[in-house]
Image (cartoon, rainbow, N blue to C red):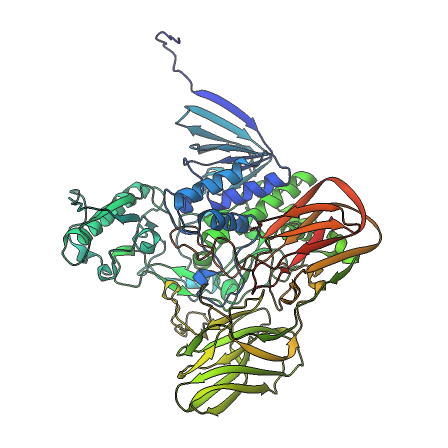
Amino acid sequence: MLVQNNSAAIRQNKTTSLQSEFVVIGGGTAGVCAAITAARKGVKTVLIQDRPVLGGNASSEVRLWILGATSHMGNNNRWAREGGVMDEILVENLYRNKEGNAVIFDTVLLEKVLNEENITLLLNTAVYDVSKSDDKNLESVRAFNPQNSTEYIIKAPLFCDASGDGIVAFKAGASFRMGAETQEEFGEKFAPDKAYGELLGHSMYFYSKNTDKPVKYVAPEYALKDITAIPRYKAIGKDDKGCRFWWFEYGGRGDTIHETEEIKYELWKVIYGVWDYIKNSGNFEDVDNMTLEWVGTVPGKRESRRFEGLYMIKQQDVIGQSKFDDAIAHGGWAIDLHPADGVYSELSGCTQWHSKGVYDIPYRSFVSKDIDNLFLAGRIISATHVAFGSTRVMATTGLCAQALGMAASICIENKIKPAQILENGLIKKLQNELNLFGQSIPRVPIQKESNLLSKATIKSSSSLKLTKIIGDGEWMNLGTATAQLLPLKANQKYKFKVLANVLEATNIEIQLRTSIKAENYCPELILETQISSLEKGEQEIEFEFDTTLTEDQYAFVTFLSNDKIELKNSNQRFTGILSVFNGVNKAVSNNGKQTPPAAIGVDTFEFWIPHRRPEGKNIALEISPAIEVFEENNIRNGFVRPGKTSNAWSASLEDKNPSLTITWDEVQEVSEIKLFLDTDYDHPLESTLMGHPEEVAPFCLRNYKITDLNGNLIVEKQGNYQTINTWKLEQPIQTKGFIIEMEHPLENVPASIFEIVCQ
């Protein structure tokens, strides 16, 4: 029993002091990825989150899906899903939670963090103050947890502010901006004026469900009474829910930090007014049994402070795909700005302009120019308001922040500050360490000296020679132009044969297209066009292109739209091979072609996008000569996803027992074997609400074993679904080689591996 008598002195809360190496403030996707990456490199890390769950806007408190460069598969960024820890989380969520339950996603994130012994997690703990050892260095942060009535003082040599509003950077005195730059400051032609608004607002959502009996609804007094106050009210559907109502946005005219509570009340007013409209207006059928299941209580913030780093990324870097020597990540979401009046605006809920491909994001944009031991992460990084319209999305922030976790480990190891990674030439080390974790920095391969395979001999039981994509699928009408995206060789003429069902006599127009930039997948350059007359009925169409590519890269065998023609599909799927369509994806402002006003500094081009599985099948083709880009040496070329070519070894489907044999001339000591596999980087893996057709990507190698050259088992895996399989051997082995024996993932999908790294 505890009894305390009256005290004249003011009582103090319990205070706990922690000493760490790296403190991450904010447990959204950015903070989680930064903390996990640092912890896996042996850095003692404290992760502080002011909410009861991790995930920020992706958590069950807000329920926004995670997206990034893949952009709902609505742009020309192929195989662009973010790698590393961000990918691992999304792939894990797919396996456990393909239906997109936000509560289950909470558990995926929490498990990932709790599994790291080097992370001390403080949930329900809000940082409110900092101390500095001098003008340019943080010493500690102070935080309070109202659940356990405990104050924390956390000291460390390095800090990462991933808090969203930048509480640590703000308190530390770092330079920041709020609002939009003028067009003149950085020459950004898309910079908005004050009429459009300078800040993006907050959003809140609701979920509804059907019950087995009528449910009445009486709206609270504060609910919106006049639904016509929402100009887009006719877009409201009774079955829409969650972040499909992303345009329930408000607050861009106010202070998105200090007026957050007022913004929240206005969004509640909208939500309950909209539900009253759905239930009681009489404009919707079959709503009697519907009820509200969940309403958000925490607004999802889009924008507040942005802090100045060593470089400020701008519109021209996004649209022009600027290349940086210190690139540590890629972006690819559209420049996505919203009218400040949000849900009450007469304008479209967003204005999105895409680049032709992914773009570099430099390390300098994450290093504070004012506070020497502070990293900037999440939506507060050093970007203009316009560029922020692209960099702010969660998969991008997670990818970027894991680079900071890795940078922290290099700083600790070398006893340096974040900016000194640039000064000491350690940026190459940072890039390589990230790529070994699956970062896939554009154009930056894993360094050969990091991989024992660079001096090995590699032999495969077979390699795919793509001569035919068999026609065992359905007929596909050419009402929408379509293309088969193929990795072709330079200076090589190709012949093709396709099976068509012609509904009435007509002409077919076939083009060979490619991208001006070899690393892009934007079929803007028409190399050759052929037009042929067709009679009615099923027939094979043969054609040959005389034009050749000047370098190895992806090309589009393109069939222009003609609804009098059907092409045969295939059920076969191959790593790095897919079909695309000149189609529409209104979720990302894609109407088939981007046609911006001339004066805003954005490109005009067509969108050629895949269909989601189970659709999106390859076109049945015969190809001559064979496409031979799946050789075994790809597994040590340093790239872990398709780029200018497939970058994968794939076995022949006729090879029933595919294997790879790796040998060295001299005995090697091997302590780790890492396999980079194909979980379809083209699929966005939205974390919540959307749902996905399968729990494991069809290309993913599921079952394999690794033996030494004498047949002794080293490791075996059954039922794999993850992208990266890392095998840290209990004891290093002395060996002259090993053999990987595997099964094809599916009968119509060959076994494939992007990269194998031995250390």
Q: Position of residue 111 (x, y in %)?
A: 50, 38
Q: Is residue 418 visible?
A: no
Count of residue discs: 0
Left or right of 4 in this view: 19: right
Task: Between residue 490 and residue 368, name the one nearer to us.
Answer: 490
Looking at the image, residue 523 lies above or below residue 345: below
Task: Between residue 604 and residue 91, name the one nearer to us.
Answer: 91
Looking at the image, residue 142 lies above or below residue 6: below
Left or right of 399 in this view: 59: left
In the image as oriented, which residue stretches furthest toward the right?
666
Looking at the image, residue 163 lies above or below residue 84: above
Q: Position of residue 250 (x, y in %)?
A: 30, 51
Q: Position of residue 265 (x, y in %)?
A: 26, 43
Q: Position of residue 494 (x, y in %)?
A: 62, 82
Residue depicted at 66% across the width and 67% down the height: 630
- Quarter of the image with the N terminus in it: top left
Q: Is residue 557 visible?
A: yes
Residue depicted at 42% across the width and 32% down the height: 124
Left or right of 341 in this view: 332: right
